[in-house]
Image: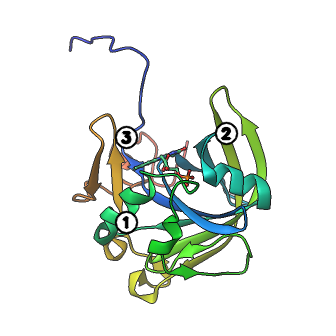
Amino acid sequence: MAKKNIGRSFNIFPMPVVIVGTVTDGKPNFMTAAWVTKLNTEPPLLGLSLGRRQHTAKGIEQTGEFSLSYPTIDDVVLTDYLGLVHGYEEDKAAHVEIFEGALAHAPMVRRCPVTLECRLVQKVELPKDYLFIGEVVNVYASESVLTDGKVDVLKLRPFVLTMPSNTYWALGEPVGEAWSAGRALLKTAEGSDS
Ligand SMILES: Cc1cc2nc3c(=O)[nH]c(=O)nc-3n(C[C@H](O)[C@H](O)[C@H](O)COP(=O)(O)O)c2cc1C
Protein backbone atom coordinates (compact mmCIF):
# COMPACT_ATOMS: atom_id res chain seq x y z
CA MET A 1 0.00 0.00 0.00
CA ALA A 2 1.56 3.33 -1.04
CA LYS A 3 2.02 5.82 1.82
CA LYS A 4 2.14 9.60 1.66
CA ASN A 5 3.79 11.82 4.30
CA ILE A 6 1.06 14.31 5.27
CA GLY A 7 3.11 16.43 7.69
CA ARG A 8 3.18 16.35 11.47
CA SER A 9 0.12 18.28 12.55
CA PHE A 10 -2.05 15.53 13.94
CA ASN A 11 -5.23 15.28 15.95
CA ILE A 12 -5.84 12.06 17.78
CA PHE A 13 -9.25 10.89 16.69
CA PRO A 14 -11.86 10.50 17.87
CA MET A 15 -11.67 12.60 21.02
CA PRO A 16 -14.01 12.56 23.99
CA VAL A 17 -16.11 15.69 24.47
CA VAL A 18 -16.45 16.90 28.05
CA ILE A 19 -17.46 20.07 29.85
CA VAL A 20 -14.93 21.38 32.37
CA GLY A 21 -16.36 23.22 35.36
CA THR A 22 -14.40 25.66 37.51
CA VAL A 23 -14.84 28.61 39.80
CA THR A 24 -12.88 31.48 38.28
CA ASP A 25 -12.65 34.86 40.01
CA GLY A 26 -15.29 33.58 42.44
CA LYS A 27 -17.86 32.63 39.76
CA PRO A 28 -18.74 29.28 38.19
CA ASN A 29 -17.61 28.84 34.59
CA PHE A 30 -17.85 26.01 32.07
CA MET A 31 -15.85 25.22 28.92
CA THR A 32 -15.79 22.42 26.38
CA ALA A 33 -12.66 20.27 26.16
CA ALA A 34 -11.54 17.35 24.05
CA TRP A 35 -7.85 17.02 24.93
CA VAL A 36 -8.57 14.86 27.96
CA THR A 37 -7.15 11.46 28.88
CA LYS A 38 -6.78 8.95 31.70
CA LEU A 39 -3.20 8.96 33.05
CA ASN A 40 -3.03 6.66 36.07
CA THR A 41 -5.11 3.91 37.62
CA GLU A 42 -4.53 4.32 41.37
CA PRO A 43 -4.80 7.05 42.39
CA PRO A 44 -7.10 7.79 39.46
CA LEU A 45 -5.42 10.62 37.55
CA LEU A 46 -6.47 12.35 34.36
CA GLY A 47 -4.84 14.95 32.15
CA LEU A 48 -6.44 18.01 30.66
CA SER A 49 -4.63 20.19 28.12
CA LEU A 50 -5.76 23.80 28.20
CA GLY A 51 -4.72 26.91 26.32
CA ARG A 52 -3.10 29.45 28.60
CA ARG A 53 -5.76 32.08 27.83
CA GLN A 54 -8.64 29.92 28.99
CA HIS A 55 -10.66 31.38 31.84
CA THR A 56 -10.89 27.78 32.98
CA ALA A 57 -7.10 27.51 33.34
CA LYS A 58 -7.15 30.58 35.57
CA GLY A 59 -9.87 29.02 37.73
CA ILE A 60 -7.98 25.77 38.19
CA GLU A 61 -4.86 27.72 39.17
CA GLN A 62 -6.85 29.80 41.65
CA THR A 63 -8.71 26.98 43.42
CA GLY A 64 -6.86 23.74 42.63
CA GLU A 65 -10.17 22.10 41.70
CA PHE A 66 -12.25 21.38 38.59
CA SER A 67 -14.92 19.05 37.29
CA LEU A 68 -15.64 17.10 34.11
CA SER A 69 -19.22 16.50 32.93
CA TYR A 70 -20.08 14.13 30.07
CA PRO A 71 -22.77 15.61 27.80
CA THR A 72 -25.14 13.39 25.82
CA ILE A 73 -26.09 13.77 22.18
CA ASP A 74 -29.09 15.82 23.37
CA ASP A 75 -26.72 18.59 24.47
CA VAL A 76 -24.57 19.21 21.41
CA VAL A 77 -25.73 22.83 21.14
CA LEU A 78 -25.00 23.72 24.78
CA THR A 79 -21.65 21.91 24.64
CA ASP A 80 -20.54 23.66 21.48
CA TYR A 81 -21.62 27.04 22.87
CA LEU A 82 -19.43 26.51 25.96
CA GLY A 83 -16.46 26.13 23.60
CA LEU A 84 -17.18 29.21 21.51
CA VAL A 85 -16.80 32.00 24.02
CA HIS A 86 -14.60 32.75 27.03
CA GLY A 87 -15.95 33.05 30.55
CA TYR A 88 -14.53 36.59 30.79
CA GLU A 89 -16.68 37.58 27.80
CA GLU A 90 -20.01 35.98 28.72
CA ASP A 91 -21.63 34.43 31.77
CA LYS A 92 -21.80 30.92 30.29
CA ALA A 93 -22.90 29.47 33.63
CA ALA A 94 -26.25 31.23 33.17
CA HIS A 95 -27.10 28.44 30.70
CA VAL A 96 -26.20 25.65 33.13
CA GLU A 97 -28.10 24.16 36.07
CA ILE A 98 -25.29 23.41 38.51
CA PHE A 99 -24.85 20.25 40.56
CA GLU A 100 -22.49 20.55 43.54
CA GLY A 101 -20.55 17.63 44.95
CA ALA A 102 -18.04 17.45 47.78
CA LEU A 103 -15.60 20.04 46.43
CA ALA A 104 -16.42 23.72 46.76
CA HIS A 105 -14.85 24.78 43.46
CA ALA A 106 -15.83 22.03 41.02
CA PRO A 107 -19.33 22.90 39.75
CA MET A 108 -20.86 20.17 37.59
CA VAL A 109 -23.58 20.18 34.92
CA ARG A 110 -26.69 18.62 36.45
CA ARG A 111 -28.17 17.46 33.12
CA CYS A 112 -24.99 15.49 32.27
CA PRO A 113 -25.50 11.90 33.47
CA VAL A 114 -21.85 11.32 34.44
CA THR A 115 -19.74 13.92 36.22
CA LEU A 116 -16.36 13.81 37.96
CA GLU A 117 -14.90 16.17 40.52
CA CYS A 118 -11.14 16.50 40.57
CA ARG A 119 -8.40 18.01 42.67
CA LEU A 120 -5.35 19.47 40.90
CA VAL A 121 -2.21 17.41 41.47
CA GLN A 122 0.21 19.09 39.08
CA LYS A 123 0.37 21.76 36.40
CA VAL A 124 2.85 21.09 33.61
CA GLU A 125 3.91 24.06 31.48
CA LEU A 126 4.09 22.87 27.89
CA PRO A 127 5.53 25.13 25.14
CA LYS A 128 2.10 26.53 24.27
CA ASP A 129 -0.46 25.00 26.61
CA TYR A 130 -0.83 23.79 30.19
CA LEU A 131 -1.32 20.16 31.11
CA PHE A 132 -3.38 19.97 34.28
CA ILE A 133 -3.16 16.64 36.06
CA GLY A 134 -6.10 16.03 38.33
CA GLU A 135 -7.00 13.32 40.80
CA VAL A 136 -10.58 12.13 40.52
CA VAL A 137 -12.17 12.58 43.94
CA ASN A 138 -15.71 11.40 43.14
CA VAL A 139 -17.69 10.20 40.13
CA TYR A 140 -21.45 10.81 40.11
CA ALA A 141 -23.81 8.98 37.75
CA SER A 142 -27.55 9.12 37.11
CA GLU A 143 -29.30 5.80 37.77
CA SER A 144 -30.66 5.99 34.23
CA VAL A 145 -27.23 5.33 32.67
CA LEU A 146 -26.17 2.47 34.95
CA THR A 147 -26.30 -1.26 34.27
CA ASP A 148 -25.26 -3.43 37.22
CA GLY A 149 -23.82 -0.35 38.91
CA LYS A 150 -21.52 0.56 36.01
CA VAL A 151 -21.84 3.29 33.40
CA ASP A 152 -23.47 1.79 30.30
CA VAL A 153 -22.22 3.69 27.27
CA LEU A 154 -25.34 2.83 25.26
CA LYS A 155 -27.49 4.45 27.93
CA LEU A 156 -25.12 7.40 28.32
CA ARG A 157 -25.18 8.27 24.59
CA PRO A 158 -21.98 10.37 24.60
CA PHE A 159 -20.51 11.96 21.51
CA VAL A 160 -16.99 12.38 20.21
CA LEU A 161 -15.12 14.97 18.15
CA THR A 162 -13.04 14.53 15.02
CA MET A 163 -10.64 17.14 13.68
CA PRO A 164 -9.85 18.64 11.22
CA SER A 165 -13.41 18.00 10.01
CA ASN A 166 -14.64 19.60 13.29
CA THR A 167 -17.56 17.21 13.55
CA TYR A 168 -19.41 15.64 16.47
CA TRP A 169 -20.34 11.98 16.16
CA ALA A 170 -22.52 9.61 18.12
CA LEU A 171 -21.03 6.19 18.79
CA GLY A 172 -21.48 3.55 16.08
CA GLU A 173 -21.79 -0.22 16.21
CA PRO A 174 -19.56 -2.35 18.47
CA VAL A 175 -17.05 -4.28 16.35
CA GLY A 176 -15.43 -6.61 18.85
CA GLU A 177 -14.70 -7.47 22.47
CA ALA A 178 -11.55 -5.83 23.88
CA TRP A 179 -8.91 -8.06 25.50
CA SER A 180 -10.70 -10.94 23.84
CA ALA A 181 -10.93 -10.67 20.04
CA GLY A 182 -7.14 -10.96 19.68
CA ARG A 183 -7.09 -14.32 21.41
CA ALA A 184 -7.74 -15.84 17.99
CA LEU A 185 -4.06 -15.10 17.17
CA LEU A 186 -2.53 -16.21 20.49
CA LYS A 187 0.02 -19.02 20.13
CA THR A 188 -0.27 -19.97 23.76
CA ALA A 189 -3.28 -21.48 25.43
CA GLU A 190 -6.04 -19.41 27.06
CA GLY A 191 -4.89 -17.18 29.91
CA SER A 192 -1.64 -15.79 28.46
CA ASP A 193 -1.41 -12.02 28.71
CA SER A 194 2.08 -11.46 27.27
C1 LIG B 1 -15.37 20.61 20.75
C2 LIG B 1 -14.39 21.54 21.41
C3 LIG B 1 -13.30 21.04 22.08
C4 LIG B 1 -12.38 21.88 22.70
N1 LIG B 1 -11.31 21.35 23.35
C5 LIG B 1 -10.44 22.18 24.00
C6 LIG B 1 -9.36 21.65 24.75
O1 LIG B 1 -9.21 20.43 24.92
N2 LIG B 1 -8.50 22.53 25.33
C7 LIG B 1 -8.65 23.89 25.21
O2 LIG B 1 -7.84 24.66 25.77
N3 LIG B 1 -9.69 24.43 24.51
C8 LIG B 1 -10.58 23.61 23.91
N4 LIG B 1 -11.64 24.13 23.23
C9 LIG B 1 -11.79 25.59 23.17
C10 LIG B 1 -12.40 26.18 24.44
O3 LIG B 1 -13.56 25.46 24.83
C11 LIG B 1 -12.76 27.66 24.19
O4 LIG B 1 -11.59 28.39 23.90
C12 LIG B 1 -13.53 28.28 25.33
O5 LIG B 1 -14.00 29.53 24.92
C13 LIG B 1 -12.69 28.47 26.59
O6 LIG B 1 -13.56 28.93 27.60
P1 LIG B 1 -13.03 29.65 28.93
O7 LIG B 1 -12.12 30.80 28.50
O8 LIG B 1 -14.29 30.13 29.58
O9 LIG B 1 -12.30 28.64 29.73
C14 LIG B 1 -12.58 23.29 22.63
C15 LIG B 1 -13.70 23.81 21.97
C16 LIG B 1 -14.61 22.94 21.37
C17 LIG B 1 -15.81 23.51 20.67
Q: Quadrant of residue 13?
A: top left
Q: Which mark is residue 130?
A: 2
Question: From the viewer's perspective, is residue 141 above or below residue 6?
Answer: below
How crowded pointer 3 is (Cα within 10 Å; few <14, some 14-19, many 20+) is rated as: few
Q: Sequence order check: which comes first, mark 1 or mark 2?
A: 1
Marks 2 & 3, CB-CB < 8 Å contact: no
Residue flagged by tag 1: what amino acid is it?
Leu
Residue identifier under label 3: 13
Distance, label 1 to label 3, CA atoms, is 22 Å
Q: Position of 155 compared to 20: left or right? A: left
Residue for point 43% across, 82% down: 146
Residue 73 occupies which quadrant of the picture?
Answer: bottom left
Kind of residue at disc 2: Tyr
- Residue 122: x percent and y percent? 78, 48
Name the N-terminal-most of marks 2 and 3. Answer: 3
Quadrant containing the N terminus is top left
User: Of tags 1 and 3, which is closer to the observer?
Assistant: 1
Q: Nearer the viewer, mark 2 or mark 3?
A: 2
Q: How far apart are marks 2 and 3 (CA)?
A: 20 Å
Find residue 174 and report its horizontal and vertical position in percent.
26, 59
Number of marks present in the image shown: 3
- Report the side of 94 relative to 46 (left or right): left
Name the kind of residue labelled 3 in the image. Answer: Phe
Answer yes or no: is residue 39 visible: no
First in sequence, mark 1 or 3: give its number. 3
Q: Residue at x 59, y 44 (%)?
A: 50
- Disc 2 residue: CB within 8 Å of ligand 1: no
Q: Is mark 3 within 8 Å of ligand 1?
A: no
Question: Does 136 sit above or below residue 51?
Answer: below
Label 1 secondary element: helix
Q: Is residue 75 visible?
A: yes
